[in-house]
Image (cartoon, helix red, strand yellow):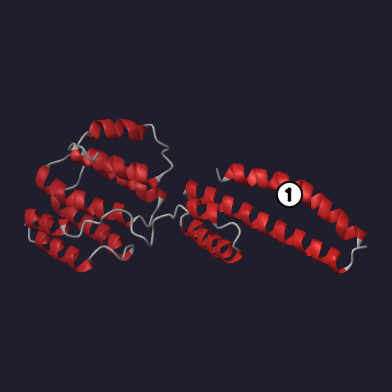
Amino acid sequence: MEIGRFQDALDQLEKSPQSYADVHFYKALSYWKTGQFSNALDALKKAIGVDEKYAEAHFYYGYILVDSCIQKPAMPELPSPIERLKQSERYFENAVSNSESIDGETVEKGVEKARDSNFEKGLEILEQAIPKGRSETNRPWDSELFLRFMYKNAKDITRILHQLERLVEQNPKYPDLRHALGSAYLIRAWYCFSKATDQFKNAIEINPDFEKAANKVKLLQNDGRGLLILLRAVLK
């Protein structure tokens, strides 16, 4: 896409997992750049269907509608330019309400110009509000790097685990998030396993004849090696 090979981009995106909102979003941009407005809007609907809070998808839905009023005012697949503008306003509102990085005042100024049938000027103003990628508040956080290096710190484990649980609740259809959360639970399990072993060892230090604790330490040490191998394989 960055070098203008939009059809090649579409070919690659068609091979990508269609369960990701970003795949549909970038398909939409590629369709739009090749003048396929209807396909672009359909792809954005799919992106929003996966992630209803995808602010950038809402913004571009409105933006492409306005652009279509300039490039292709007579399109059988789309309503009249006036109706398209009305639709765009709703999507712009959704974009602003779901993102702190999209300037609502700039969007409103652009929409006002478009309302006066000055679509070109409206689009020019709206360009100033184009989001620069996923907003921090809504972007699913790839925590694999953190998970690899923080599994010995209880405070970090708990913090990351709670963050991931919240993100999964907010973005239930993102497989990457669920994968990261599964890894985090495994790390938490390893940490608890290690802490349990330490406590049994402490019990033996206090009472060297504590046979039950000694047996448990042996069992945990044997099983712990397998769990650690599993954990390293998961985070590889």
What is the x, y in percent for residue 159? 54, 65
Q: Is residue 77 visible?
A: no
Q: Amino acid at mark 1?
A: Gly
Q: Is residue 234 left or right of residue 198?
A: left
Residue wearing tag 1 = 224
Q: What residue sits 19% from the left and 63% below the top?
A: 107
User: Which residue is pictured at 72% across the width and 46% down the height?
Assistant: 225
Q: Residue at x 38, y 46 (%)?
A: 21
- Give SS at disc 1: helix
Sort mark 1 into few (<14), some (14-19) or many (20+) by Cα contacts within 10 Å.
Answer: some
Q: Nearer the viewer, residue 3 or 86?
A: 3
Q: Which x, y percent locates residue 208?
A: 90, 63
Instruction: Note whether residue 19 is visible.
Output: yes
Q: Nearer the viewer, residue 159 or 197?
A: 197
Of residues 50 and 22, the one nearer the viewer is 22
Tell me where residue 171 appears, x and y as whole percent.
46, 55
How many numbered marks, from 0 up? 1
Q: Nearer the viewer, residue 175 or 53?
A: 175
Q: Residue 137, percent across and down?
A: 38, 62
134 with respect to 67 (left or right)? right
Q: Quadrant of residue 139?
A: bottom left
